[in-house]
Each structure stands twice: as C-alpha cells, then as structure tokens.
Amino acid sequence: MKKIWVSMGALSFLFLMTSGRISAFPSLETAKKNARILVGPNILVSRDGDVPHVELMAAANPKKVKHLLGTAITFTRPDGSTACKTYASKDGGYTWADSSFPEQVEFGGGDPQVAFGLNGTAYFCALTDVRDDAGKTRAGLLFYRSEDGGTSWGKMTDLGYSYDHEQIVVDHSFGQYAGRIYIGTLYGYPEYQVGVFRSDDDGKSFVGPVKCASGQGKIGINVCNMLILSDGSLFVPYGDFPFRPEESKKTDRINYWFVTSQDGGVTFALPKSIGYQQHAKYDEMIKARKAGSFIRTGFAMFAADGSTSAFKDRIYAAWDDVRFGRQRILFSYSKDRGETWTEAKALCPQVPEWASQFQPMVFVNNEGTLGVMWYDTRASKLDDQFHLYFTASTDGGETFLAPVRVSSAPSFPAGDTNLVPGSLFISSGKESIKLSGISAHSRWGNGGDYMGLTADVNGVFHPFWADSRAKGYEIWTSQVIVQVEEEKSKDEETVPEEEKSKQRGPLKMVQAPLNSQIELVYDPIKYDAKMGVATIPIRLKNISQEPLFGPLSVRVKALVDEEQKKYSGEGWENIPEIINAANDLKGPGAVFDYSGALRDFESLEPGAITEAVGWKLKFLNPKFSDLFLEVEVTGFIQKK
C-alpha cells in the first residue's frame, strides 16, 4: 500500500524524549509492598492462517466488562499481501471472532485503530488504497462502526485520502464534549501537518481535519497516541524529525511536542516541548538491519490518568532510547498536564548489559494503576528472540513493581513465515514494470509501529501483542491483574486466623474428577510428517459455574476406540505413542501435567481457559495420523 513513508519508513527505528538531564539507570523501588502482578494464561487470538499479524491495537468496552476489541495488519489478502482485520471477544479474551472488510480485502491496508464509544459502540479505522479523480493510488482513511461489539460492521465512512499513521481516541470524561471521537493524522507532504478529525454523532459523520501542528516544510512530524484529560481537554503529542535523506543520516535524536484543545478539537494552543529521544546513528542502524536485527526504535507512547485517584490528569510517557548504550525503555511523567516533565529514568535497569528493550505501551486503568509493557531480549545473548514483560505503578509513576514476564514462550521474529516477501507492489510505466516486495520481518521486525494494551472496567489489563513463538507473528493476549491488598484495620489484625476461619465456615480442597466440568479446546495442530509426530496444543476450559483449582492433570485412559475397532476389523496397527508425558509413560496411564497452566492464577474461573499444553504423539506409519484418545481430567474443588 502506498503511504507517506518519508523518513519514518527509515526512521521507524527512531523516536522520543524527555526534558532535563537523564540519570543512568536509577533503581526503581517496589511501588507498594502489598501489591503484586498476576499473569494469566497466554491465549492465541488469531486463527486465520499461518500468516504474519503486525501492528496491533486493543480496546475495552466501557459498558460490558467482557467485551474486548483488537485489530492488526494481517497478510491475509488472496495474493498474500496486507489487509487490516478486527478481532472481537465477548468472554474476556478467551475466544475471538475475526472480521474482514471488503475494501481491505480488495485494496489492502495498514495503520489499524480501534476504540469504543461511551455507549459501547465499537469503532475501527484504517488506511486503504483508493483511486483519486486522476486515477492515482492514494492512502484513503476509512472509518467503520459496529453496534454489536465488533462482531459485524456497518458501511464505511470515507474521510478522504493522502493520510498516514492515524490515531483514534474517544472522550470518556464527564466534560461537555463527552463521547466525541477524535482521529489525529499526518498529511500534507512536504509540509508535514498533523490534523484532527472529530465526530459528535457516534461516528456517523466527521468534521476536519483541523490543522494543529506543522513542520513548515522544514522538518517532518508525526502524531503519537492522543489523550483525553478529566475535563475533556484533548492532548495531541507528536514528534519531529528530518525528512530529507541527507539530513536524516546525520541526526540521532527526535524532539517531542504537544498541543492541546480546550474546545473539543476546534482550535489548538501553540506547541509546547516535551523533550527528546535518542536513537542509534544512521550507519549503526543500517549495519544492524543488514545483520538481520529486528530491534527498532519506535514511537513514544503516552497515557493519562482519567480516574478519580490522587494522580488524576497525570500524563505518562514511555519510549525506547539508546543514550545509555543498549536500547532501554525510559519513562517520565508530568504532574501539570504537560507543562513540566520529570527526569527520565530507565524503567527496568536490572537486565544484562547486552540485552535490548523496545516496543513499549502504556495504559492507566480505572483505579489509577499504570501498566507498562515492552519486548525484552534478556533471555538471549544472540538477540534472536524476545519475551513480553509488564510492570505497574500504583503511586503515580513514582515507583514500579518488579517486572514480570507475560509471554510463556519466546518469540523468534526471523521465522519462515515472517521472512516471506508476501506484500508485493507492482507499478507499470512506459519503459518498464516495477515489482517490489516486503516481508513482515523486514518492515515490521519488531511486530509493528505499536502494540495493544487496554484495561477493562474491572481494572484487569489485557496486553495484545505480536508473538512469533511459531513461524510467524500471531496475535496473543493474556489477563494481567495488579493486585493491591487493602490496609488491614486494627480490629481485623487482632482477630486470630482460627477465629476468622470459624466465621467463614470450614472450607477444604477435595481432589475430584472434573470430566463433566471441563471441556478440551485446542490451538492449531502441527504435524512433522518426516518424524511422524503430531503436536496438539490442548487447553482446559471450565464449563461449570464454580471455580476449579489446581494442580490440574490429564490422564490417558485409552488410545484405541474399542467401539470403532469392532467395525474396522484387523489392521489396527498405527496406534500412536505418547512421547512427552510427565510420567514418561507412552500409552494408557500417561499423564499430561497442567500444574503450571494457570500461570499466576490460583483457580480456573467459570468460562476461563488454561495455557495450552502440547500433547506429542508419534505414529508408527507417518502417512496415517488419525488418532483417538480417551482421557480423564482431575483437579480440586472447594467443599465445606
């Protein structure tokens, strides 16, 4: 798809800020001793083919706690090129339904965004190729609405063409512009302008764009994710960068600015400085790219506290930066709506010197807890893999909890699927026909220009990330709970534990078969025909109305369907053997261990699903892979 790549294409490895001198890796203490981070099972979202999924975004419905919406660029067009899709969940992120858009399928697209309105209307916008009156292909900005949480979508609204990197935000405040939708976007090459569309009718129509910032034809600019403050003020951050090749090769820093609107995006104040981000020098970036590095420097990410906590309207920023050597996530915040910013700090300095951190995203839940996630290579000196990490602050960004690993398996960006040049561009001219192609690894080696992070109305965080634990980038999610224990009153502290137990009534855990309470669900099956080995990722889903407790396990009772055998006669010789049982048995009696499949959660709640455990079966005859398993599931239930 033809876009204003400008230096952002080459400067997709750049970006960010902050004012003041920066101390090298200051230690961040634990935010509160009575707070901890709990990570739930990793859930596969995308099940629409073995193709890359990059540049993700996510949103949570303010009216329905279990309704989530995500989006991504996917290599799912019939010719293998890129189109944007959405993914909707109505059970808190355990299962997802994907949606395609006719314009995206026909013309391709990029830069997807999703959001929810005040009353639960779902919004999706993205760029797609359109033809102008002269027949020239341009990047059109199309907007869609959904009245059912993203399961189905209405007709598109065409906002025009020649836009890039649009960002959407909805006013969920109690101000006079509550419900107003804003879409910020880059346009106007070579002047480089940032403008904002607005809608007051739930996305049925838009006004704009209203110009709010300009590079004056001297420097490039691009919009970052916009924020709404408690009184409805619109906060629009953007970065500037040299866009002429000879100048971009000389710089190693990006300056950041913001403008605000107090009247709902009709007029904007003059720009104010935020600070800067230092990126690698041009020659170093090119050298790293040629060596196959997937690590990029991305956009600054911002979040605002819209809760009623003591940190209301505090603005947070996180970005990746190389001023201390290897790429690190730096962090800063503003107490005064952007007028001044704290000295930047390394968010997680306790990593090996050779490790890199990149792709941050920040979000504040409705309890005022700040969540930050990022990719981290600390598990590999070879820099060939990364994990997703998360930390949180419960005191307004003053201190942070110890970071935890969210991803249950490492991502390998240089997988076969990511290396396929699946997005080809063909242009015809009088003298020749040009063909060019890009792969997910070459253009979106870090998974895209942004990842998704949101929180539902219960305060649970939902990271939505590009994960390449298989051959290519898939979409994965999880639930992350920042648990803050309430301070105990003196009366509570004096009540003996035995007495409290009597008041509650005696409860005990009883081991029991869970076959009627559990449903087996599975992720895509993989088969190695050469080895004759099938890997079946099986998850356990609680279909009862009561929580189930671990440790959970699955025991194989039979590998032959005796009833079917009666009709098949002789020749039942291709019975597979189990090759990864926890107790090393290869047939009946083999046990699959699910003790770690709840991650940090103590129970499997009704409707919840565990982490997948791969059941590996080896077939005597690799050309025949039919199988049968009879199993029983055991775990613990709570009884009085």
Image (tube, rainbow, N blue to C red):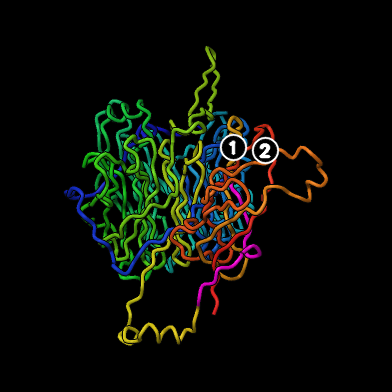
Residue 231 visible in image: no
Snapshot quadrant of residue 326: top left
Q: Earlier in the sequence, mark 1 or mark 2?
A: 1
Taking the magenta stretch, the answer to whether it contains residue 267 is no
Seen in the image, is 569 located left or right of residue 157?
A: right
399 and 135: which one is in front? Answer: 399
Tag 1–tag 2 contact (CB < 8 Å): no
Residue 67 place in picture, x, y as percent: 55, 60
- Count of marks overlaid on the render: 2
Badge 1 density bin: few <14, some 14–19, many ≥20, Cα 10 Å: many
Q: Is residue 53 above or below residue 306?
A: above
Q: Secondary structure at mark 2?
A: loop
Placement of the C terminus among the 4 image quadrants: bottom right
Check disc 1 and report the residue beneath it: 533
Check disc 2 and report the residue beneath it: 625
Q: Which stretch is magenta? A: 508-524
